[in-house]
């Protein structure tokens, strides 16, 4: 349970190592909007019930006001490896009547604990986890013709320190021609190799900025940029923040 009061407009970045489901018990502060920083979409209104996948930064802003809310944080390790894909898509306005009912019951148990409340809350969280997984189940994840082994090899190459590998080099590692590889990769991910790689590097950059004390120039090198200036420019285009602004904002929100 959380109770907040803000005396002035806020702009914050939230990121957590757990899956978080948050439901407001009063109302959101005026003009509460947000967007997932991995998305190219414009900021939209934040609904009463939201789901934030682990390690997925969300940028939010709102005017002065108050808010009471209940939050359920789920350890990603509780989800089996094959189910983690169900929690890769967040929502700032989740429409799920079952989740709303469960969250309301959790709030009630926290405010008015009774016999075995801790056990009941744990069971409710498990039910919430199962429901979210079931609703997002769409069958086995398609790899668009790329085997899981090859797709993992591609991810490893993209996330290695230093400059991004050439498409031809990645294709060679998969025993495919560059053209055939690019077509299969787009079918598997819905994105071009270049765009996907750039987004993965930005995700890694945000993680390093938020979770480590590395200098910006070292993060720039690890993420494949020739210098800190080029990295800062790309990071700002992607997030709207400079690396130092992002680091400061994430630490203030902890």
Image (spheres, helix red, strand yellow):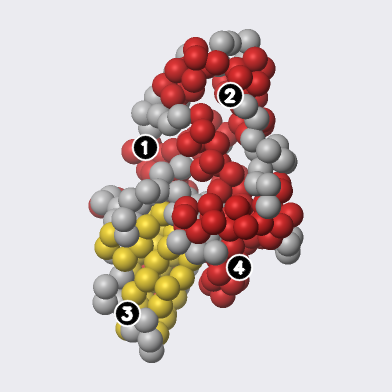
Residue that carries the numbered disc 4 in the rendered image: 244
Quarter in which the N terminus is drawn: bottom left
Residue 252 point in image, percent of width and height = 56, 75
- The quarter of the displayed image where residue 214 is located: bottom right
Q: Nearer the viewer, mark 3 or mark 4?
A: 4
The answer to which quarter of the image holds residue 152 is top right
Neighbours of disc 4 within 10 Å: few (<14), some (14-19), many (20+)? few
**Marks 3 and 1: which is nearer the front?**
3
Q: Assign the C terminus to one quadrant of the image.
A: bottom right
Q: Position of residue 111 (x, y in %)?
A: 41, 76
Mark linked to residue 167: 2
Q: Secondary structure at mark 2?
A: helix
**Pointer 2: residues within 10 angstroms few (<14), some, or many (20+)?**
some
First in sequence: mark 4 or mark 1?
1
Cα distance in 3D space between marks 3 and 1? 33 Å
CA–CA distance in space, label 2 to label 1? 32 Å
Q: Which mark sits nearer the N-terminus, 3 or 4?
A: 3
Q: Earlier in the sequence, mark 3 or mark 1?
A: 3
Asked if the residues shown at circle 2 and circle 3 are in contact, with their CB atoms under 8 angstroms apart, the answer is no
Q: Residues within 10 Å of mark 3 (few under 14, many from 20)?
A: some
**Residue to which mark 3 is pinned:** 63
Say whether disc 2 or disc 3 marks the residue closer to the N-terminus: 3
Q: Please give the residue where the numbered disc 1 appears in the rendered image.
A: 136
Mark 2 touches mark 1? (CB < 8 Å)? no
Q: Classify mark 4: helix, strand or loop.
A: helix
Q: Nearer the viewer, residue 231 or 94?
A: 231
Between label 2 and label 3, give the one nearer the viewer.
Answer: 2
Seen from the viewer's position, the closer of residues 99 and 6 is: 6
**How many labels sit on residues?**
4
Percent of width and height locating residue 38 = 45, 49
């Amino acid at each position: 349970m959380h109770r907040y009061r803000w005396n002035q407009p806020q702009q914050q970045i939230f990121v957590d190592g757990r899956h978080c489901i948050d439901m407001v018990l009063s109302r959101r502060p005026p003009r509460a909007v947000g967007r997932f920083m991995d998305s190219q979409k414009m900021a939209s209104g934040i609904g009463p019930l939201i789901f934030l996948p682990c390690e997925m930064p969300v940028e939010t802003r709102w005017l002065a006001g108050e808010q009471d809310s209940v939050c359920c944080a789920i350890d990603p390790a509780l989800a089996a490896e094959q189910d983690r894909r169900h929690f890769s898509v967040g929502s700032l306005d989740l429409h799920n009547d079952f989740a709303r009912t469960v969250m309301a019951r959790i709030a009630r148990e926290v405010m008015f604990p009774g016999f075995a409340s801790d056990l009941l809350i744990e069971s409710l969280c498990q039910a919430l986890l199962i429901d979210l997984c079931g609703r997002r189940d769409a069958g086995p994840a398609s790899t668009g013709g790329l085997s899981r082994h090859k797709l993992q090899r591609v991810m490893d190459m993209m996330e290695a320190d230093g400059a991004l590998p050439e498409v031809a080099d990645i294709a060679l590692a998969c025993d495919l021609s560059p053209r055939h590889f690019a077509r299969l990769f787009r079918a598997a991910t819905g994105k071009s190799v270049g765009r996907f790689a750039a987004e993965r590097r930005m995700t890694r950059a945000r993680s390093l900025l938020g979770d480590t004390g590395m200098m910006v120039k070292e993060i720039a090198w690890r993420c494949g940029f020739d210098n800190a200036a080029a990295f800062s420019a790309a990071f700002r285009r992607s997030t709207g923040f400079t690396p130092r602004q992002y680091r400061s904002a994430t630490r203030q929100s902890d």
